[in-house]
Image (cartoon, rainbow, N blue to C red):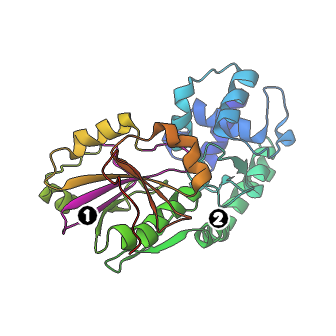
Amino acid sequence: MSRIEGAISILAALGLPKAQQNERSGLTLLALAGLRPKSPWSAAKTPLLRTVDIMDFMREAYGKNYAPNSRETIRRQTLHQFEQARLIDRNPDDRARATNSGKNAYRLTGPALAVVSSFGNKMAFAKAVAALGEQFGSLSADYAGERDLLRVPLTLPDGRAIVLSPGAHNELQAAIIREFGPRFAPGAQVLYLGDTSDKHVVIDAPALKGLGVVVTEHDKLPDVILFRSAPTWLYLIEAVTSHGPVSPKRHKELEVVFGKSRAERVYVTAFPNAAAFRKYASQIAWETEVWLADHPDHMIHFNGDKFLGPYKPL
């Protein structure tokens, strides 16, 4: 039996779905255990690896060269299931790391290491598999509880309470609802709010349709959509912590989706602070707005002469 076949047998013994009993998942398990073709199973270890590190290991140790665009497949079709089965922990070095961070990393859990390292010893292997099953509930609850402590609680203007997954991006989105909305969109409804781990946390498709906007699964919506009925304005807001301001290209993309709306569009790029804004200042489209969460009372207007004139305090 080859190392890859052995890894697939381990996954089968642990009850992983058929869709994860394949070469890709077997190689992923071997990478996470640091096991090369001639390494004994007892030499399994627990390196902390990003998806790209796993792919590098597959190529270097087993000559399996997955295309760069396979990274998302490995994450969604193998690592996600490994995490659910409690074979791995995601970001044990930083539980607060955002779900969409390029630094996301994975490590075998202790019970999973015991299973892999005992493969080949029938009695020890059976005992380790049983132990992992017995510990599943408490391990899963502990892990989920630790993650929940880092989630971002948010109360929407209509009183609904939601929680966003951990990370700077969602903290900025929460600031948009809590700080930007009351100041610059008083009384506005939240028609859409995304999440780095859940594409649509809030989506009011009927309200959008009533405004002449039909949303499909293929539309790349802004991070936050607010609607204010008087005046009739749609606020299309991008929350930027690592990429994605309202650039000229992004402005055109959004106009394709929202251009027929009966509401006038207000395009806003939100940044956590001035340092983040400076990185993207040259990319901001004209006729749009910029808001900084650490200076919530002010806006930066990229609107030509619309606001030209002497400042007069209220």
Q: Is residue 256 left or right of residue 109?
A: left
**In x, y percent, where is residue 10?**
67, 43
Residue found at x 25% / y 41%: 255
**Disc with the residue nearer the chain's start (2 vs 1):** 2
Foreground of the two, 278 or 157: 278
Where, by quadrant of the figure, is residue 158 drawn?
bottom left
**In x, y percent, where is residue 59?**
69, 22
Q: Is residue 8 left or right of residue 77?
A: right
Q: Which residues are magenta?
A: 219-245
Q: Is residue 1 left or right of residue 164?
A: right
- Mark 1 neighbour density, 10 Å: few (under 14) some (14–19) many (20 or more): many
In the depicted structure, whether residue 61 falls above or below residue 47: above
Residue found at x 44% / y 72%: 178
Q: Secondary structure at mark 1?
A: strand
Residue 242 in magenta? yes
**Which residue corresponds to mark 1?**
227
**In x, y percent, where is residue 236?**
32, 53
- Which of pointers 2 and 1 indicates the residue nearer the eye? 1
Residue found at x 19% / y 65%: 231
Asked if residue 56 can be seen in this view, the reply is yes
Residue 102 in magenta? no
In the depicted structure, whether residue 237 falls above or below residue 54: below
Foreground of the two, 95 or 258: 258
**Which residue corresponds to mark 2?**
136
Q: Secondary structure at mark 2?
A: helix
Q: Amino acid at mark 2?
A: Phe
Q: Amino acid at mark 1?
A: Phe
**In x, y percent, where is residue 138?**
66, 71
Where, by quadrant of the figure, is residue 9 drawn?
top right
Residue 207 tag number: none
Asked if residue 1 can be seen in this view, the reply is no
Cα separation, mark 2 vs mark 1, equals: 44 Å
